[in-house]
């Protein structure tokens, strides 16, 4: 909850920042989703997300096409929950990981 609340407050974007800049409405919608997730006070056991495309102002042929073709629904259902301490190794890079500096 704290993670999503902070993400919403800071305006974090969990995708390519260029995509967020190109589709600011989508970025605002995702930020609102993070805020609402934080406000639930717990874990969502089932989530149904409906994504609808539209053209602002109307009269845009591409917007009309996207409105007919671009809508989608994504559903997720939580099947189990485990509690306990996570090992530090989950947050460490693999032992054979190497950085390759850019030239």
Image (cartoon, grey):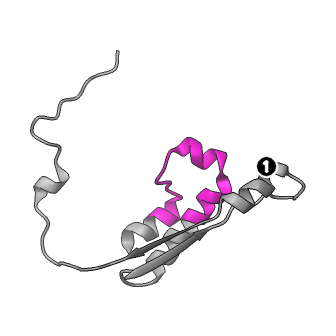
Instruction: Kindly state the secondary structure of the residue where label 1 is placed.
Output: helix
- Where is residue 98? Give x, y as percent: 18, 30
* Magenta-drawn segment: 7-30
Instruction: Tell me where residue 48 appears, x and y as whole percent.
Output: 50, 76
Residue topped by disc 1:
62
Pick the front one: 52 or 36: 52
58 or 1: nearer the eye? 58
Q: Position of residue 83 (x, y in %)?
A: 17, 78
Question: Is 13 on the left-hand or right-hand side of 100?
Answer: right
Drawn side of residue 65 relative to residue 71, left or right: right
Q: Determine the residue located farthest toward the top in the rendered image.
A: 103
From the viewer's perspective, is residue 71 above or below residue 21? below
Which residue is at a point 45% across and 84% down the rendered structure image?
40
> Crowding at label 1, few (<14), some or many (≥20) Cα neighbours within 10 Å?
few
Quadrant housing residue 82? bottom left
Which quadrant of the view contains residue 95?
top left
Q: Count of labels shown?
A: 1
Instruction: State the image quarter where residue 90 is shown.
Output: bottom left
């Amino acid at each position: 909850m704290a993670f999503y609340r902070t993400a919403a407050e800071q305006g974090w974007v969990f995708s390519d920042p260029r995509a967020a800049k190109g589709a600011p409405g989508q970025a605002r919608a995702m930020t609102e989703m993070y805020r609402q997730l934080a406000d639930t006070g717990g874990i969502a056991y089932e989530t149904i997300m409906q994504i609808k495309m539209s053209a602002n102002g109307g009269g845009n042929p591409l917007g009309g096409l996207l409105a007919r073709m671009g809508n989608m629904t994504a559903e997720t259902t939580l099947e189990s929950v485990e509690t306990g301490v996570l090992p530090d190794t989950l947050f460490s890079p693999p032992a054979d990981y190497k950085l390759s500096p850019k030239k």
